[in-house]
């Protein structure tokens, strides 16, 4: 591994350690480096990963999630094109947010990816890195809110504000 790649790996590791969110190192022959981390800290944290594939001059911040069996069953029970509308709404949101995504409709798996390129010196700032993490996480959070909205059995115009409405990430 070149000095530049090593410096980038060390920087990313340090950023994750500084915030107390690093969980483990990934090892694969396809990667220069990779880490699993939990974001944000607290009760709503989700496992995410950052990888640097071999022969690529970028890193990817990724979150992958499986739609719950309960929600998958509800989506499958929809009449007409409501299931298609859900996934199409999600696709349009991800496109608007300028993230890559993979949606496996058959297995109800959603993967959201943000690509980051280093600067001319081979560095990625902590701010740039965490902006990418936040973008991917907020896309994930939005997808969960959208699933809840689509899967509500009752008319949402009569729904009261409750504790579920407070989606604070840091409480």
Image: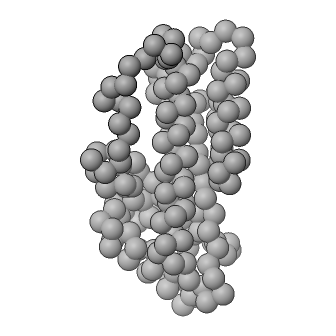
Residue 13, how many percent across, how many down?
41, 74
Considering only vertical position in the picture, is 147 above or below 94? Answer: above
Q: Nearer the viewer, residue 131 or 158?
A: 158
What count of labels does the image hold? 0
Q: Nearer the viewer, residue 113 or 95?
A: 95
Q: Residue at x 40, y 66 (%)?
A: 25
Q: Residue at x 54, y 71 (%)?
A: 128
Q: Residue at x 61, y 89 (%)?
A: 121
On-image quarter of the N terminus:
bottom right
Residue 80, how many percent across, how many down?
72, 11
Considering only vertical position in the picture, is 6 above or below 128? Answer: below
Q: Residue at x 67, y 18 (%)?
A: 82
Q: Using residue 47 as the reference point, say whether residue 123 is left or right of it.
A: right
Q: Nearer the viewer, residue 63 or 139?
A: 139
Considering only vertical position in the picture, is 148 above or below 133? Answer: above
Residue 118, how many percent across, how many down?
62, 78
Which quadrant of the view contains residue 19? Answer: bottom left
Q: Using residue 129 as the reference point, say whether residue 100 is left or right of it.
A: right
Answer whether residue 51 is visible to the viewer in this image.
yes
Q: Using residue 58 as the reference point, say whether residue 24 is left or right of it.
A: left
Q: Nearer the viewer, residue 89 or 160?
A: 160
Which quadrant of the view contains residue 4? Answer: bottom right
Residue 120, how many percent across, how many down?
66, 87
Answer whether residue 63 is visible to the viewer in this image.
no
């Amino acid at each position: 591994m070149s000095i530049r790649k090593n410096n980038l790996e060390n920087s990313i590791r340090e950023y994750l350690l500084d915030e107390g969110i690093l969980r483990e190192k990934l090892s694969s022959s396809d990667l220069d480096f990779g880490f699993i981390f939990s974001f944000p800290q607290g009760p709503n944290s989700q496992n995410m990963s950052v990888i640097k594939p071999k022969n690529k001059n970028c890193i990817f911040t990724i979150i992958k999630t499986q739609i719950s069996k309960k929600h998958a069953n509800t989506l499958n029970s929809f009449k007409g094109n409501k299931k298609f509308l859900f996934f199409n709404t999600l696709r349009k949101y991800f496109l608007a947010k300028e993230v890559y995504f993979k949606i496996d409709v058959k297995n109800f798996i959603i993967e959201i990816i943000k690509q980051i390129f280093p600067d001319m010196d081979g560095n990625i700032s902590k701010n740039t890195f965490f902006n990418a993490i936040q973008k991917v996480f907020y896309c994930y959070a939005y997808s969960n809110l959208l699933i809840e909205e689509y899967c509500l059995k009752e008319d949402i115009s009569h729904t009261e504000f409750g504790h579920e409405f407070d989606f604070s990430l840091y409480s």
